[in-house]
Amino acid sequence: MNPYEAPTPPTMTALDRRDFLRLTSVASGGLILGSFLKNTGDVQAAEIAKTAPAGDFTPNAFIRLGLDGSITLIAPRPDSGQGVKTSLPMLLAEDLEAPWQSVTVQMADLNSIYGSQAAGGSTSTPTFYTLLRQLGATARIMLVEAAAQTWGVPANECVAESAVVHHRASKRSLAYRDLVAKAATLPVPDAKKAVLKDSKDFKLLGRRISGVDNQKIVTGQNLFGLDFKLPGMAYAVFEKCPVFGGKVVSANLDRIKTLPGVKDAFILEGTSDLRGLMPGVAIIADSTWAALSARRQLKIVWNEGTHANDSWDNFTQQAQALAAKGTGNVVRKDGDIDAAFAAATKTVEGVYSYPFISHANLEPQNCTARVSADHAEIWAPTQNPGAGADMVNKVLGIPKANITVHILRAGGGFGRRLSADFVVEAAAIAQKAGVPVKLTWTREDDLRHDHFRPGGFHFLKGGVDDSGKITAWRNHTVLFAGGLSADEFPSRFIPNHLGLSSVIDNGIPMGPWRAPGSCVFAFVYQSFIDELAHAAGRDPLAVRLEILGDHGTVPGTGERGTPYNAARMKAVVKLVAEKSGWGKKLPRGQGQGIAFHFSHRGYIAQVAEVTVAKTGELRVDRVVCVADVGSQIVNLSGAENQVEGSIVDGLSAAWRQELNIERGRIVEANLAEYQLLRMPDAPRKIECHFLQSDNPPTGLGEPVLPPLAPAVANAIFAATGKRIRQLPFSKTDISWS
Amino acid sequence: MAKFTLQVNGQSRTVDVAPETPLLWVLRDHLDLVGTKFGCGIGQCRACTVHIGGQPVQACMTPISGVGRKPVVTIEGLSADGTHPLQKAWCELDVAQCGYCQAGQLMTASALLADNPKPTDEDIDNAMAGNLCRCGTYLRIRAGIHRAAELATASNSKEAAK
């Protein structure tokens, strides 16, 4: 997986979609529709129907109506704070005409009938928006038909509202509960032909709906992965080599086994997969504290492997050497870069860099597993239950059909829980221990063994012509995996462009971190555009609008290239300028900064306003955000929360977060050294505007984050004249006099 | 191992654990009170905040042997039925994202409101600066505390009117 690119859970092709909506009769009396997989889906759908109480109406795997009037909706994808356990069932409820307060939401287990259950890449809304509405509508149509048949009237004279079907002409009504038995005997109509509600009739979509788990959250009920317990369960901790890829040579297991509460201790040989089951020592005890206490007595001899001398300083030197050579993989070559620089009236060179950082989920990684030789049952706070099952299958050789994964609420995801290392660790430990175990990572484990957001270096040179237009852009990126994309903005929008890409060899486990790639690239490119605007003596907003020009949708490069709709971006940039009062006069020490970025199908622009004290203390006074994520917001409260959270998270990552690497290991041990943003440093005010456009609704978990860092850095420049070219901000002195 | 009898959420609970065991793990592993969360183990994130003798305390840093007879209140005991003004405000404003830190936020905020029923933004920032929210819900937490203060005032004046 390229840690600079968004993970791409399989998106549905037209064929999948047809298959998903295919009608499948099953023998148990219920009627099922909905499967992605032609061969296994029907069987699984039938199994789900069988688990429903007899007589219930289960028109598909997502909806169950009971004879008692209960309405159960299934949330197909894990919730780690992005809100899909609330927003996806809202889609079902809207077209089902189910009153939200009477709905019970149930989290799905891993099951291929739900398609990809990986909650990554901000894909949940675009994948499910229409499908779930169609499934809700199909059930509603069947309930209306049941009423029509009961009354002997045409179905088109009947209307469903709030779980009641009405025949206005005869003033008759029947509640859904009274139609369940009959509806269950009717054929399931073609979901594709189901007429969906007009948006003006929405009762739920676009409204602010409080999260379905909120009451449990505020009363401290058993909910998260770490809260889960099994009868007879033991508590496990697992120590891995602090140097990435290191192996266990020996450990004082005999001594550990004598310590209070310890039931077992053993070495796991592990694999060479840096993001899989790594070697380490497991301690099994009768409580978490007994395991943690014993761990303090653990003495392990490690073989630290070939990367024990890696350091950030060394990586920096390598990057500089690569840049000095000026050679790299040419990923983009437009126009004549040398001629453009020769003709430029101003050129600017800048080296940008950013460090490795952690996901720092507040709930440390954990997983509970009950595993025998050939069966595994897993309870995991995961974003990606399928990856857990795949890895348990691959590493432990347990057949997939014998692996059950229960999805528990996760205390933060941000991409970390797309990985399955903690799942396979728990399964491997439980199998070897012969008892069910809950594996708990400490914060130190979590920081040391993250699948990190990689650092990177960008050696930039830009040129403007005598009209102040940016005419030349040279970008040599030095990354730790993958490489620069040919389509990375402002590629396609600057006539003379050279993109070079180099990669530093390393042994560090890396993974997607909220808006992978974009979360750092936007800082670099939107800051450098600002540098060129100021060099030309021009308004940074005007230069941005000029770059976007009058283009409509600009196609991507190659088969996998992503089109860029410059018109949508221009619209959000113009609106953010208007809403923020762009260009207002501010005293020295205060400034506005603007930035925009397209990622995860979302077009986002932000203006930040900051105050920098003469001594260099930063305060973010206000952030105004305009987002175009399509025609319809699903849950307005959840959407606004994602915008606010992305802005705070973006500031947190940019301001103080960095992991140093020395002697092949992470230096920062815990949250005292690794500093997350706290309330007093949060922006004083965040304003969020959704620009609704005539495009399919798309996700909000990620795309709002990338523009924040450059908007603030550009505002700091406007306030102080100090240009920040390095993350975190805290490394640059921004005091002024 | 030693026996300790705690007063937790108005109940007397006895556990047999090592004296240095942090209150956090006694609550979670031995008393099945899992609302109090583990985040860092060194008092930096305060997801483990509980009240001991009415004061907000980090349960991850508090050995069971140091608790004594002082009453312990956890998130499960913040109200009998989830209707503390802060709990109502949190649901009304949809404060949580992942929700993992919110028990600690609520316990710190409830101690603040007990001392200062009408806190300013600055009071809130000072009181809440120790509690991390990785999802970044700080603005909603601040708004939630103001809203709870309003709800408490409204309910107090109703009581007074009776």
Image (tube, rainbow, N blue to C red):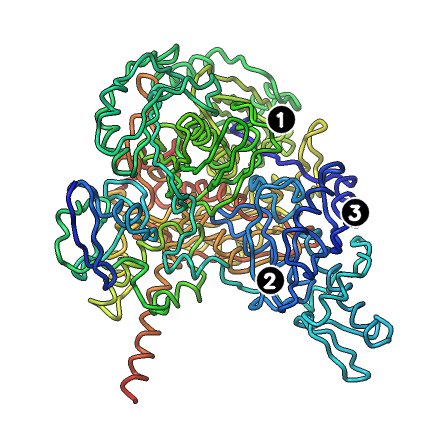
Q: Is disc 2 on the same chain as disc 3? A: yes
Query: Which residue is rendered at x = 45% and y = 40% of the image?
Result: A710
Q: Is residue A122 left or right of residue A360?
A: right
Between disc 1 and disc 2, whose residue precedes?
2
Q: Which residue is mark 2?
A: A206
Which badge, 3 or 1, is on the more N-terminal residue?
A: 3
- Pinpoint residue A206: horizontal percent, then vertical percent: 60, 62
Q: From mark 1 to mark 2, how far is it between C-alphas?
A: 36 Å
Q: Quadrant of residue A431?
A: top left
Q: Which residue is mark 1?
A: A486
Residue at 80%, 56% in the rendered image: A188
The one nearer the camera, A31 or A433, is: A433
- According to the picture, the residue beneath numbered tag 3 turns out to be A22
User: Which quarter of the rendering shows the N terminus of chain A?
Assistant: top right
Helix, strand or loop at mark 2: loop
The residue type indicated by label 3 comes to: Arg
Eyeballing the image, is B67 above or below A661? below
Q: Is residue A106 left or right of residue B136?
A: right
Please name the amino acid that badge 1 sits on.
Ala
Which residue occupies the foreground of this view, A116 or A440?
Answer: A440
Q: Residue furthest bottom?
A: B162
Q: Nearer the viewer, mark 3 or mark 1?
A: 3
Amino acid of disc 2? Gly
The percent position of residue A37, horizontal first and vertical second, equals 72, 38
Of callouts 3 and 2, the N-terminal one: 3
Q: Is residue A440 visible?
A: yes
Identify the element where label 3 is drawn. loop
| Residue A372, above or below A654 | above
At x 55%, y 48%, the residue is: A700
Relative image position of residue A14 (x, y in whole percent) = 78, 41
Secondary structure state at the residue bearing disc 1: loop
